[in-house]
Amino acid sequence: LKVLLYFFILVDLSLALFEEPAVVPLPSWVTMLVELLCLLVFTLRLIHYAKVIPRDKFWKDPKNICIIVILLLTLVDMIIYGALKAANCYGVRWSRVLRPLLLVNVTEGRQLRRAFRSIRNALPQIFYVFLLFMFSVLMFSLMALKLLGKRGLTTIEGAPYFTSYLEIVFDLYVLVTTANSPDVMMPAYNASFVFAIFFILYILINTYIFMSVFLAVVYNNYKKYLKEEVRQLVRAKRHKMVRAFAVLQEQKEEGGEPVVSQASWNQVVHLVQPDISNAHRELLWSVCDDKNQGAIGKVAFVQLADLLNIEVITIKSRPHPLNSLCPAFYQSAPSRLLCRMVQHRAFVIVYDLIILVNAVFIGLDEENPMIANSEWVFLALYMLEILLKLYVFEPRAFFSRHSFWNWFDTIIVVSALVATIVNSAMKSSGGYTSRQILDIVFILRVLRLIRVVDSIKRFRTIINTLIRIGPAILTFGQLIIVVYYIFAMVGMELFKNKVKFYEDTSDPAKAYCGNPLLKGTAFAQLNYCKNNFNNVVSSFILLVELTVVNQCSGFATVTHMSARIFFVIFHIMVVIVIINIFVAFVLEAFFVEYSVDKSDLQTSLEKKIEELELAVAQYVTVTTLGANFCCQPLWTFMTNVSSDIFPCFIARILKGKMSII
């Protein structure tokens, strides 16, 4: 149901590709029919949700009210737009800006709503800092007007320099983004080097100090509200666990404290996590019932939710297929020597050196025959590495779903081999001029260098942290898309077809980005014509550029100076607020990664595995499936544990998670 809902949300958002101004134009009745279908699906989902929760709770939930309002406004807009089109009148689909809000307010968009709450919580403090920042900009602008306005200076385009106060305010605001640096200061600097001090002080105060203060304020508020939200969630979780204990509790003996029996506990765990293995469940029970009483009290039961949050991966120990097919050969002295060589640290170091040499060759001239032929040597070495490791390590363990680097390297190497063979075959056939396959080969060659990251412990820690916060990064990605989509819809209505891109500019009608107002401007001279709002794809690309630099002079030239307000608001929303909140989140994630110790439950789980004589160790740099391929240590399995209850376990303790293999 969740996948289906998000599919229709994606379809609804994608309609902008086919609506005016369109990438691929379709008749308006087609897009409206598809949108009507999407609205029907959203309505059915809302009705379904209303059936499963109390009516008073449904109508008190703001997100449900928001969805209802969006659906009604969209329907009204479609009716009005259809009537205007039928009467051959110009119409605007103003409800398109509401589409991404469905992504926020659907029941499944909980994480995205939390991100928006982070923005809402940070806004009051950001507002006060922003007022102080704007006061500084206004003061410097007034100072610039008095210092430079009467000196008769001109810009490189011949326009008067710093004679209009509003122009100065905007130019200095853009200077904070460094988009117009050093252009904005050059006329004054050319007049006297003393004026450079003015701009240096401005950049120091507003670009470095105030922008850092924005980040500090956002981070401080983010951390404060994050702690409060986590505290509320923990309190609610414990309250619900206590209520569950009250339902399941039994009186073990007269006058004794209430307990939950193992049978009831097993039923609860089976209902909560039906896919959990018997071995995993027995292990968790051993941690809860550390005194082997056959029942647990309230404290141990309440900890069950935290215990289930510790990621545990179980894989049964399997012999290598070659060991089963030809044991005499696989257990021979040369074979064991080869296995020890592949598992040795020197093997890892040798291939790290090969990767570095390969990096040097990639940077050299591809047309040199020796350089071109060396690619086959490196591919052969990489394939040999994969085959050797498949010989040493059990293939199913080697390609387990948690062995990211194994999959990454194998896919990259095999893809590079296939692409190189195809490229060579097509070149030898003659008449091959396309660079598409060659571009793929070049990309795959560079991607191979990433594998060296796994060999360095510090790099691996950073990568593991990025992988763990990946879902949250995707949440902020959705947040950015929501804001981009809204601004793209507004931008297309304001600026569509004002700036056009033509590959052939020899025609006078196509010069200056198709708009005579841009004649002589830096926008046209620098050929920024493709930066426009003529369709949703171009709009998104332009908004990405504006996230880095806020240069919008061309659009103000072809419309009105007030158009700059649109771009300033975008910069405030995306760069000052959202990007700073995202940076605050990444900072907090890395602080937690480097500072948080293992929890008591993780320690208890580790001790219990040791008591059961299962191999336990910390995450180390020595690897069983080869450095550059995986991060799982090599262990000697204990043999005196019943394989019916416990498969062979290897514990890998990560900060915040434990993996048992």
Image (cartoon, helix red, strand yellow):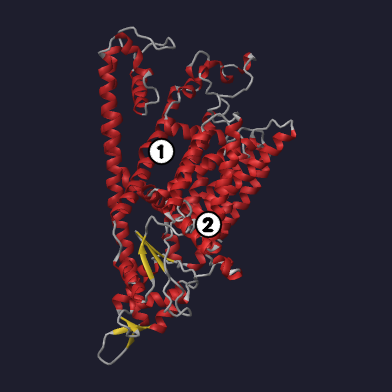
Q: Position of residue 652 (x, y in %)?
A: 39, 63
Place residue 184 in its image quadrant. Answer: top left
Q: Position of residue 196 (x, y in %)?
A: 28, 16
Q: Is residue 614 left or right of residue 17?
A: left
**Disc 2 secondary structure class:** helix
| Label 2: how many Cα within 10 Å (few below 14, some 14–19, many 20+) | many
Q: Position of residue 384 (x, y in %)?
A: 56, 51
Q: Are marks 2 and 1 in contact (CB under 8 Å)?
A: no
| In this view, the mark in front (2 or 1) | 2
Q: To which residue does mark 1 refer? A: 574
Viewer-nearest residue: 640 or 381: 381
Examine the rendered structure and indicate whether residue 203 appears above or below residue 383. Answer: above
Place residue 125 in its image quadrant. Answer: top left
Q: Is residue 71 visible?
A: no
Examine the rendered structure and indicate whether residue 433 appears above or below residue 557. Answer: below
For the point 37% across and 59% down, which residue is it? 619
For the point 44% across and 12% down, which residue is it? 157
Q: Is residue 224 visible?
A: yes
Viewer-nearest residue: 132 or 250: 250
Q: Quadrant of the N terminus?
A: bottom right
**Disc 1 secondary structure class:** helix
What type is the residue that disc 2 sits on? Lys
What type is the residue that disc 1 sits on? Val
Viewer-nearest residue: 87 or 528: 528
Q: Position of residue 430 (x, y in %)?
A: 74, 32
Viewer-nearest residue: 409 or 589: 409
The circle on residue 411 is none
Q: To which residue does mark 2 refer? A: 389
In space, the residues marked 2 and 1 are separated at their CA atoms by 47 Å
* Mark nearer the N terminus (2 vs 1): 2
Q: Quadrant of the C terminus?
A: bottom left
* Residue that sits furthest to the top in the current view: 152
